[in-house]
Amino acid sequence: MSNETSIKRRTSKSFQKMKEAGEKITMLTAYDFATAKYVDEAGIDSILVGDSLGMTMLGYDDTVNVTMNDMLVFTSAVSRGVKRALLIADMPFLSFQISTEQTLMNAGKLIQAGANAVKIEGGSDFIISQIKALTQAGISVTGHLGFTPQYINTIGGYYVQGKSYENTIKMLEIAKKLEDAGVFAIVLEMVSEESAKYISENLTIPTIGIGAGRYCDGQVLVIDDVLGRFYGNTPKFSKQYVNIKEIIKNAISQYGNEVKNIIFPSEEHIFKLPKEEKEKLDNTLK
Ligand code: KIV
């Protein structure tokens, strides 16, 4: 069997099986074709085209400026690099808050751009009704509770959520409503470890934590934080595995120096005229 045919695509069902088997689910964000290929080939279970691309790719301060068009461009680029991972695309701010018709239309466009599922932040009654409409239309949905960056202007800052008994019980109640509405997984962002553990243990579907401690059913990080590529602040909950920014800057400054000092291009990078043609050129008076 060739490599191509032996690739088994991850699905929302695989997530459920992993939770039941106690196997942790791995997820990373990616926003472009090449990075999607690296993440996929490294065997990560799921790729999220997060609206964090507003900061990592577009240079905004937060995610609220990200549009459907932005999400479609990045989602289709990523989808061309993915063979194995489950591809989830974020529904950006205002793409699911206005009407069910718009929610269905926008989610449908992300699926047609190559996503296997969409992710929606929040758990208000309106959002739950949108999730029901999506799952009834055959669109797989991931929920997102805890710190929800699209609501930064109403939350008022980057605060850890679920810091009391009451908040934890409330968050579990909402998570159960999301589960009943048909989401196949829930991202828990910046939630105390104990609350995230309690919520994960009381749901049938898997939780994917980011800054939510060790007991979620899976973990997700922003690829730029993992690779040391991001220019802004790296959050406490993230882990940097390599300083790619320094590696890239060194390579670029080496290139600049070599051009200035006529070291690049060298013999192996150039194309030559055939000998006779060169002779004609040499014999032509300038
Ligand atoms: O946009 C994103 O990258 C996310 C993750 C932080 C979960 O939503």
Image: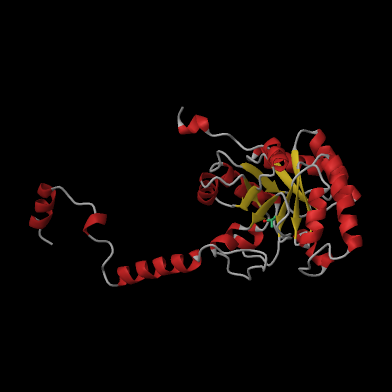
The tally of labels here is 0
Give the answer, above or below, for where 233 lies relative to 168. below
Q: Residue furthest front?
A: 22
Q: Quadrant of the C terminus?
A: bottom left
Residue 161, above or below 93: below
Q: Identify which residue is drawn at 53% across, 51% down.
A: 35
Q: Is residue 118 left or right of residue 273?
A: right
Which quarter of the picture shows residue 17?
A: top right
Relative to 75, say whether 58 is above or below: below
- Say left or right for 286 vs 59: left
Q: Looking at the image, which residue is at 75% across and 62% down?
A: 190
The x and y percentages for residue 147 are 78, 61
**Coordinates of residue 26 in the picture (x, y in percent):** 63, 49
Which residue sits at x=68%, y=39%? 111
Q: Is residue 169 left or right of residue 252?
A: right
In this view, which residue lies farthest toward the top?
Answer: 1
Residue in the foreground of this view, choosing between 180 and 233? 180
Query: Quarter-wise, where is residue 134 in the image?
Result: top right
Q: Is residue 251 visible?
A: yes
Q: Quadrant of ligand 1?
A: bottom right
Task: Report the front residue among 259 and 213.
Answer: 213
Which of the 4 image quadrants contains residue 237? Answer: bottom right
Rendering coords of residue 47 (x, y %) = 62, 47
